[in-house]
C-alpha cells in the first residue's frame, strides 16, 4: 500500500505541470458548477422569502353583511392550503393606504368617500405557494357570491416557478457538460502519464506485477487529483462568495458543510472515472 | 521445466516466426539459443515469458500450460522467471538497490525483508559497493549486473537472457557470462539467446540453433558437429 501511494505521488513530482493542469481543470469545472449551485441556493432562499408573501386577496362587494364575511372566513380557513384568512374592512384599507402610500397622503385625506373595497386576505401554507395551488384557492374563493374580484399576482407566481425550474435545468446541464470536460481532461492527462511511464510499466510487468498493481497508482492519482480539484473549487467558490458580499453588497449564503463535501466528493468521482476509462485502455498498448 | 511441443508462431504481418519447434530444457540446465537476427531466438523467449502466445502447439513453463493461461495469471508465471535484456531495462531515476528492490515491491513482498534480499543479490553479482549508484553512474557491465540481480531477487527457477552481452565490451562480456555460469551452477536453469559464437564455444553447454524460425540443430539430440558447420556467424 505504501509502495502504491509512493508510486501515485511520484507523478506529481515528475510531471508537476501535467498534474497541475488536471487539478485546475477539475477545480474550474467544479467551480462553475459550484457557482451555479451557489446562485441556485441563494435564489431558492430569496424565492421562498418572496413566496412567503404570496397572498390571495378577495375584494368584496359593497354592503356585504359582516356575519356572511365571518362565516366565509371560517370556510376559507378550512381549505387545506390555507393557513390564515383575515378580513380588512373599507376603513382599515383606507388607513393602511394612507400609512403606506405616503406620496398619496394628500389626495387620500381629501377624499369625501372611501373608494377602497373591503377584502379578505388569504395566506397559504409554504408547500402550496405555487401557481397551481394558488390558482385553485383563488377559483374557490371567487365562487362566493359576495366576492367581486380575486387578485393573487398569477403572473409573478408563474414566473417564479419558471425561474426555479429553468435555473435547475441550466445548472444541471452546465454541471454535466463541465463534469464531462473534466473527465476527458483527466483521462488525457492520465493517458499522457501512462505513456510517459510506459517503460517503467513494461518493466513492472516483466518482473511480475499484476495488472491491478500497475493500475492502482493511476486510479489513486486520479482520486487525489479529483479531491484536490474539488477542494480548490470550494475555495474558489468561497472567494466568489466573499467578493459578492463585500463588493456587490449582496447578502448571500455559502454552502453548508455537506454541500461543500459533496463538491469534493464530486471531484473525486470525476478524477476516478477519468483515470479509470483511460488507464485500462492505455495499459493494453504499453 | 520448459517444454515446447510442435510450436508455431505467426505474426499477422511478419509471416512465420517459429516453425514446428520442439525441445525441452531441464531443471538446472544451461542452454544457448543461437541463430541470425530474426531467426526466432527472441520469439522463443517471448513465448516462454508469455509476452507472445503460440499460434499452434504447446508451451509449458514451470508447471504452467501457456496455451490456456489466463492473462491475469501471467504475472505469477513471470515471478518464477528472471529476465535479462540486451538494453538492461533499468529505471534511470532509481539507484541500483531501488531497481532491484522494485522487482520485490511489485510482487507485494513485505518491506522488512526487502533490503536484506536486495543486498544479498547485489553481493552475489559483485555490486554491493555500488548499491546507491544510479544507472548513469555505472558502466554497461555493471548495469547488466544490476539487471541480473533484479532478475535473481525473486529466486527464479529459470533465468532468460536475451543477448545479455550484446551491448558490452569483451571484458564486461566475460564477467557477465561468468556470472550467468555461476548462477547456473547454483541450480538455476539459464536460457541465453546470443549470436556471439565465441561465447558459445567457451562453455560445454547445450546449443539450440535456429534458422528462419526453424530449429535446425540441438546439441542435446543431434550429433556433435565440426567447427565449420556450427552455429551462425
Image (tube, coloured by chain):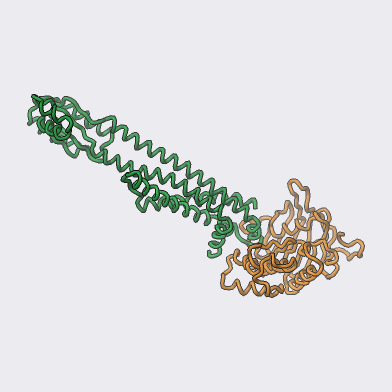
* Quadrant that contains the C terminus of chain B: bottom right
Q: Nearer the viewer, residue A124 or A96?
A: A96
The answer to whether residue B24 of the structure is visible from this angle is no
In percent of width and height, residue A92 lies at 11, 33
In percent of width and height, residue B35 lies at 83, 58
* In the rendered image, the vertical position of residue A264 relative to residue A145, given as above or below: below
In percent of width and height, residue A280 lies at 58, 51
Chain in green on the image: A
- Number of dots carrying numbers: 0
* Quadrant that contains the N terminus of chain B: bottom right
**In the figure, is residue B150 to the left or right of A266?**
right
* In the rendered image, the vertical position of residue B99 relative to residue A104, given as above or below: below
Q: Residue at x 7, y 28 (%)?
A: A65
**In the figure, is residue A275 to the left or right of A158?**
right
Q: Nearer the viewer, residue A17 or A188?
A: A17
**In the figure, is residue A124 to the left or right of B217?**
left
* In the rendered image, the vertical position of residue A70 relative to residue A278, given as above or below: above
In the rendered structure, the colour chosen for chain B is orange
Q: Nearer the viewer, residue A273 or A226?
A: A226
Q: Nearer the viewer, residue B90 or A75?
A: B90
Q: Residue at x 64, y 67 (%)?
A: B95
Q: Residue at x 40, y 43 (%)?
A: A36
The answer to whether residue B86 of the structure is visible from this angle is yes
Query: Which image quarter: residue B120?
Result: bottom right
**In the figure, is residue A6 to the left or right of B233?**
left
In percent of width and height, residue A286 lies at 65, 53
Amino acid at each position: 500500500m505504501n509502495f502504491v501511494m509512493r508510486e501515485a505521488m511520484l507523478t506529481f513530482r515528475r510531471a508537476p505541470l501535467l498534474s497541475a493542469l488536471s487539478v485546475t481543470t477539475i477545480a474550474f469545472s467544479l467551480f462553475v458548477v459550484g457557482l451555479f449551485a451557489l446562485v441556485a441556493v441563494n435564489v431558492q432562499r430569496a424565492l421562498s422569502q418572496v413566496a412567503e408573501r404570496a397572498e390571495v386577496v378577495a375584494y368584496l362587494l359593497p354592503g356585504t353583511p359582516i356575519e356572511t364575511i365571518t362565516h366565509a372566513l371560517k370556510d376559507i380557513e378550512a381549505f387545506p392550503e390555507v393557513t390564515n384568512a383575515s378580513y380588512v374592512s373599507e376603513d382599515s384599507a383606507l388607513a393602511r393606504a394612507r400609512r403606506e402610500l405616503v406620496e398619496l397622503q394628500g389626495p387620500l385625506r381629501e377624499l369625501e368617500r372611501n373608494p377602497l373595497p373591503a377584502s379578505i386576505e388569504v395566506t397559504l401554507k409554504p408547500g402550496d405557494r405555487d401557481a397551481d395551488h394558488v390558482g385553485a384557492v383563488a377559483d374557490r374563493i371567487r365562487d362566493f357570491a359576495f366576492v367581486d374580484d380575486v387578485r393573487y399576482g398569477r403572473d409573478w407566481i408563474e414566473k417564479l416557478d419558471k425561474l426555479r425550474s429553468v435555473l435547475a435545468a441550466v445548472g444541471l446541464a452546465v454541471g454535466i457538460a463541465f463534469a464531462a470536460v473534466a473527465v476527458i481532461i483527466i483521462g488525457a492527462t492520465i493517458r499522457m502519464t501512462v505513456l510517459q511511464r510506459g517503460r517503467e510499466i513494461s518493466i513492472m510487468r516483466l518482473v511480475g506485477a499484476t495488472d491491478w498493481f500497475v493500475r492502482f497508482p493511476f486510479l489513486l492519482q486520479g482520486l487525489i487529483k479529483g479531491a484536490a480539484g474539488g477542494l480548490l473549487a470550494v475555495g474558489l467558490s468561497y472567494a466568489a462568495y466573499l467578493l459578492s458580499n463585500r463588493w456587490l453588497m449582496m447578502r448571500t449564503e455559502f454552502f453548508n458543510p455537506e454541500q461543500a463535501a459533496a463538491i469534493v466528493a464530486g471531484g473525486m468521482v470525476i478524477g476516478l472515472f477519468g483515470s479509470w476509462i483511460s488507464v485500462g485502455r492505455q495499459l493494453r498498448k504499453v | 521445466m520448459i517444454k515446447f511441443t510442435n510450436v508455431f508462431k505467426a505474426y499477422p504481418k511478419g509471416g512465420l516466426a517459429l516453425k514446428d519447434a520442439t525441445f525441452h530444457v531441464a531443471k538446472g540446465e544451461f542452454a544457448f539459443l543461437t541463430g541470425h537476427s530474426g531467426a526466432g531466438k527472441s520469439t522463443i523467449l517471448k513465448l516462454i515469458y508469455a509476452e507472445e502466445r503460440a499460434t499452434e502447439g504447446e508451451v509449458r513453463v514451470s508447471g504452467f500450460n501457456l496455451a490456456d493461461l489466463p492473462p491475469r495469471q501471467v504475472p505469477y508465471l513471470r515471478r518464477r522467471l528472471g529476465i535479462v535484456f540486451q538494453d538492461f531495462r533499468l529505471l534511470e531515476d532509481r539507484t541500483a538497490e531501488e531497481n532491484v528492490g522494485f522487482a520485490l515491491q511489485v510482487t507485494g513482498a513485505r518491506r522488512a525483508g526487502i533490503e536484506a534480499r536486495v543486498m544479498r543479490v547485489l553481493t552475489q553479482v559483485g555490486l554491493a559497493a555500488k548499491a546507491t549508484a544510479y544507472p548513469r553512474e555505472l558502466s554497461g557491465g555493471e548495469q547488466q549486473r544490476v539487471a541480473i540481480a533484479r532478475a535473481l531477487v525473486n529466486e527464479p527457477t529459470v533465468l532468460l537472457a536475451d543477448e545479455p552481452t550484446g551491448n558490452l565490451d569483451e571484458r564486461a562480456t566475460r564477467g557477465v557470462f561468468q556470472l550467468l555460469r555461476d548462477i547456473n551452477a547454483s541450480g538455476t536453469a539459464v536460457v541465453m539467446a546470443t549470436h556471439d559464437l565465441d561465447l558459445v564455444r567457451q562453455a560445454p553447454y547445450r546449443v539450440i540453433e535456429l534458422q528462419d524460425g526453424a530449429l535446425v540443430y540441438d546439441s542435446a539430440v543431434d550429433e556433435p558437429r565440426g567447427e565449420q558447420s556450427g552455429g551462425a556467424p
